[in-house]
Image (cartoon, rainbow, N blue to C red):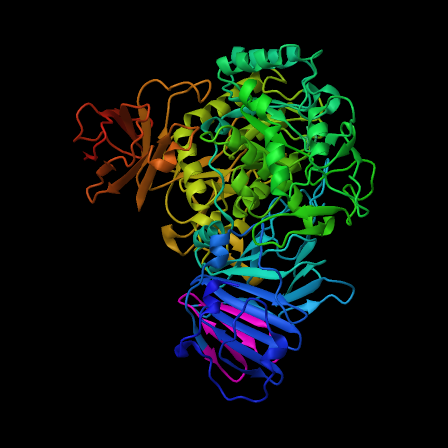
């Protein structure tokens, strides 16, 4: 319980209303909660006012609702007269301890309280909780009391009403469209090789969603690691059913109504994503597998020879001796360390897989086994023996990652690779955990894990409780281990399985997708949904993993992926090669052009990445995040299209909705003007948007003028991807490099796209250390104004922070100019492009340029 609850309540917080019957408080003492003023809440219930919320009791059920901030409330429900353990793997201790003062109220039907942003009402009848925002919009409302215990065991169900106009987004990389309405999902981390549409559960458990109703957004996070389920009106229309096999009823409601505020609040609760090294935004090449050192060297040589800008090469399980983690097969990789350093010298970072399963190899000199056994580091069976099961190396053991000492031991296993061999990053795969040759694909539910974690009692927990946390704790162990080895380097670790909050430890990907067109389509809502759940640094295997991509599919996939946060080409050992050159030079030329486009865009990408790591607002954003006003009735724009997304505030990528189809399609252009990213020209030939709106209403927005969403007809072409720039943006770009290690030549380019509320930002730091936390960064605010005389004023702010970036001048390119401008000496005008450019010094001061 929050410390605030232990203080005596000032009288103004006491909920006062006529008493009916009282329940003896002494009979339902709640551990950790001091007695407070109380009143009857119903025929047999009692409510206690707390400074930051209230406790409500009915029989042996206890409900506690507290306000952590004005816009975040936490709801906990306990049985047997007590509340669940106040502990979390996801929510940061400071957030759980936070509180704000609330104002209590009482009506004939409910007791409750309000904050500046939210109102919580608990029904006198059954304890059902209704959370309303300050405009009176009902966010979540229980239909059957605070929860219904599962008669079969320790589980429960909560049923909440679904308003007529509701839509739901989130839950991480689930299949299907972005909107979760009308579907149901299970959270149970599962190895899902070659998964297909409709398959669920997949690899991660991120029990957080953003709800939409009546023009506003809010968030709901269920902090329960057991097998849980979310049914968004699939089984019963109008009912949102949230269930769990066990574990606590412990959830948070985040007020909104701006979706960016929901994301900021979620990051405040569960942590911001770990800031990634700059090189991880470059192009990355991988495959299972490159069987020998010679093969890997040939791939890197070809990437450089073909001038495919690249920052990383990945080593899958083949480099290991008999697939044993932390070994190298000296026969196939005879000069491993030399190979890594040769790649480093060419600006290519090496990432190596280090799966969690440790081969069961007594007396073989296998150090991870020997030290792990000696220190008792492995998960046990119900009868207390180390649990052994088959994965890649054959019989293996599983580190008990919920113990701090086990994580510390695991971290030491990286010493040779990280400190001696110079490997830059690591890949934690199979950490659901995946087990071969068993129908459940994972370990027995009664396996025993030892918990040693602040907030939790030191205890033994069943696999049922730990399963969905296991990958996250593996990821954490690696992240913290690398930090211990190199305290001032940002670790790069990619995991397959995780739980809410796992974004604090780095990167994830969408697992074993397929080399099919529909998987390219699925990639977009999956990555957007991961971003909504904190995992902004995410990617999907480019070209698809299972099966062989056609040349056209690989090309289109590369085009789209160059605008997603993590861009890694990866494929299955069964599939045909999938490197950027397969299929001939015509295809390779298109792919190279898009990879080059990404490298030119790196200053913008890095600025957006830093914003995500600082605020929690994802890099890749659904349209509703930038344009929450939506359609005329507020309906989210994304319902019209699942294939369009924003990259940061300024760029909108409009991938084809059916990428396999050569037929034309239309792009939804949200309110405001747009420019074509590739030509820099304003977009014309717009048509009014016709749409099925909420409730099946057909709307044609033709009479709403230029501020309503419009559409643009597109005829798809293999060598093109429509990308648009929001009018009122400034995008930093750079000259082409072959890797992020190379310093770009010439000025940093600022592309100015005049329009309303014109703004931009430019961020840089050393790209790899934590010095930015101590002021060694450079952040420059950019803005522009469209003058009444059609002139444009561009303002570059004074850089904030002590870091000296690589550029010494800016090339300012102003787009959308119908005539050659005056006012800036040396400006050149390109009549065909409608743009003017000029070079100015970047000397650390603010400057304003006025084009007339
Ligand atoms: C799993 C991973 C895949 C990897 C393979 C071999 O299937 O998801 O990416 O290539 O294992 O390590």
Most frequent secondary structure within the magenta stretch:
strand
Q: Which residue is painted at 68% across and 55% down in the image? A: 228
Residue 270 appearing in the image? yes
Q: Position of residue 49 (x, y in %)?
A: 49, 75
Q: Which residue is painted at 73% across and 51% down in the image? A: 464
Report which quarter residue 57 is drawn in: bottom right
Name the outermost residue toward the front. Answer: 374
On screen, residue 357 versus residue 23, left or right, reads: right
Report which quarter residue 792 is drawn in: top left
Residue 688 appearing in the image? no
Label total for image: 0
Q: Is residue 626 above or below residue 600?
A: below
Q: Position of residue 511 (x, y in %)?
A: 66, 36
Q: Which residue is painted at 48% across and 81% down in the image? A: 106
Q: Position of residue 753 (x, y in %)?
A: 33, 37
Q: Is residue 406 above or below residue 745?
A: below
Residue placed most toward the observer, 534 or 570: 534
Quarter of the image where the C terminus is located: top left
On screen, residue 656 versus residue 744, left or right, reads: right
- Looking at the image, in which quadrant does ligand 1 appear? top right
Residue placed most toward the observer, 447 or 629: 447
Report which quarter residue 423 is drawn in: top right
On screen, residue 710 versus residue 439, left or right, reads: left
- Is residue 619 inside the magenta stretch? no
Residue placed most toward the observer, 722 or 464: 464
On screen, residue 625 versus residue 395, left or right, reads: left
Q: Magenta residues, as a range?
A: 105-133
Residue placed most toward the observer, 661 or 563: 563
- Is residue 119 inside the magenta stretch? yes
Q: Position of residue 453 (x, y in %)?
A: 59, 48
């Amino acid at each position: 319980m929050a410390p605030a609850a232990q203080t005596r309540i000032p009288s103004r917080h006491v909920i006062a209303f006529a008493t009916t019957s009282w329940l003896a408080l002494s009979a339902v003492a709640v551990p950790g909660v001091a007695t407070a003023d109380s009143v009857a809440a119903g025929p047999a219930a009692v409510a206690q006012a707390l400074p930051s919320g209230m406790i409500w009791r009915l029989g042996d059920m206890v409900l506690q609702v507290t306000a952590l901030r004005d816009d975040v409330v936490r709801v906990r429900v306990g049985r047997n007269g007590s509340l669940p353990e106040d502990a979390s793997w996801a929510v940061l201790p400071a957030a759980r301890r936070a509180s704000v003062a609330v104002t209590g109220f009482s009506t004939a039907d409910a007791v409750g309280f309000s904050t500046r942003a939210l109102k919580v009402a608990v029904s006198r009848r059954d304890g059902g909780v209704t959370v309303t925002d300050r405009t009176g919009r009902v966010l979540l409302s229980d239909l059957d009391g605070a929860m219904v215990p599962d008669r079969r065991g320790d589980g429960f169900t909560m049923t909440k009403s679904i308003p007529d106009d509701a839509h739901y987004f989130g839950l991480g990389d689930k299949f299907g469209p972005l909107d979760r309405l009308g579907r149901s999902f299970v959270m149970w981390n599962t190895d899902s090789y070659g998964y297909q549409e409709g398959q669920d559960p997949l690899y991660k458990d991120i029990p957080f969603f953003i709800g939409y109703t009546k023009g506003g957004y809010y968030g709901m996070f269920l902090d329960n690691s057991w097998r849980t389920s979310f049914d968004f009106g699939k089984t019963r229309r109008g009912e949102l059913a949230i269930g769990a096999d066990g574990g606590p009823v412990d959830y948070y409601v985040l007020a909104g109504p701006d979706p960016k505020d929901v994301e900021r609040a979620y990051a405040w609760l569960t942590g911001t994503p770990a800031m990634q090294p700059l090189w991880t935004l470059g192009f990355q090449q991988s495959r299972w597998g490159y069987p020998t050192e010679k093969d890997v060297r040939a791939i890197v040589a070809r990437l450089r020879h073909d001038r495919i800008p690249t920052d990383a090469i990945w080593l899958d399980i083949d480099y290991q001796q008999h697939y044993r983690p932390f070994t190298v097969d000296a026969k196939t990789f005879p000069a491993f360390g030399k190979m890594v350093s040769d790649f480093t010298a060419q600006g290519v970072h090496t990432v190596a897989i280090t799966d969690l399963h440790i081969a069961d190899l007594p007396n073989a000199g296998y150090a991870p086994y020997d030290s792990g056994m000696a220190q008792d580091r492995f998960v046990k069976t119900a009868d207390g023996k180390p649990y052994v099961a088959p994965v890649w190396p054959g019989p293996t053991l599983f580190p008990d990652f919920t113990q701090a000492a086990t994580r510390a031991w695991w971290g030491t296993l990286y010493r040779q690779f990280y400190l001696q061999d110079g490997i830059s990053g690591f890949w934690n795969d199979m950490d659901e955990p995946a087990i071969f040759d068993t129908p459940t694909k994972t370990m027995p539910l009664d396996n025993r894990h030892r918990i040693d974690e602040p907030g939790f009692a030191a205890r033994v927990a069943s696999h049922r409780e730990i399963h969905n946390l296991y990958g996250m704790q593996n990821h954490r162990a690696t992240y913290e281990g690398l930090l211990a080895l190199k305290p001032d380097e940002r670790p790069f670790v990619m995991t397959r399985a995780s739980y809410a909050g796992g974004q604090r430890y780095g990167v994830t990907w969408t697992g074993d997708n397929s080399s099919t067109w529909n998987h390219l389509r699925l990639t977009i809502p999956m990555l957007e949904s991961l971003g909504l759940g904190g995992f902004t640094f995410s990617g999907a295997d480019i070209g698809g993993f299972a099966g062989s991509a056609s040349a056209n599919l690989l090309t289109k996939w590369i085009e789209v992926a160059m605008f997603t946060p993590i861009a890694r080409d990866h494929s299955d050992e069964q599939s045909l090669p999938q490197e950027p050159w397969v299929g001939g030079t015509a295809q390779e030329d298109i792919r190279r052009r898009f990879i080059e486009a990404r490298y030119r865009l790196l200053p913008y990408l890095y600025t957006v990445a830093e914003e995500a790591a600082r605020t929690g607002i994802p890099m890749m954003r659904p349209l509703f995040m930038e344009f929450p006003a939506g359609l005329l009735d507020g309906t989210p724009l994304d319902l019209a299209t699942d294939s369009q997304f924003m990259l940061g505030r300024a760029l909108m990528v409009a991938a084809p909705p059916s990428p396999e189809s050569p037929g034309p399609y239309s792009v939804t252009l949200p309110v405001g003007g747009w420019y074509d990213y590739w030509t820099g020209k304003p977009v014309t030939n717009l048509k009014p948007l016709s749409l099925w709106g909420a409730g099946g209403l057909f709307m044609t927005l033709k009479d709403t003028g230029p501020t309503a969403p419009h559409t643009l007809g597109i005829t798809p072409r293999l060598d093109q991807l429509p990308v648009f720039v929001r009018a009122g943006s400034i995008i930093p770009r750079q000259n082409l490099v072959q890797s992020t290690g190379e310093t770009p030549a010439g000025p940093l380019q600022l592309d100015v796209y005049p329009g309303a509320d014109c703004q931009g930002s430019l961020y840089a730091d050393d790209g790899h250390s934590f010095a930015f936390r101590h002021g060694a960064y450079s952040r420059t605010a950019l803005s522009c104004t469209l003058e009444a005389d059609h002139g444009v004023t561009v303002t570059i702010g004074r850089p904030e922070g002590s870091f000296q970036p690589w550029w010494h001048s800016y090339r300012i390119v102003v787009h959308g100019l119908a005539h050659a401008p005056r006012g800036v000496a040396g400006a050149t005008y390109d009549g065909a492009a409608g743009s003017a450019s000029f070079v100015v010094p970047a000397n650390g001061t603010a400057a304003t340029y006025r084009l007339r």
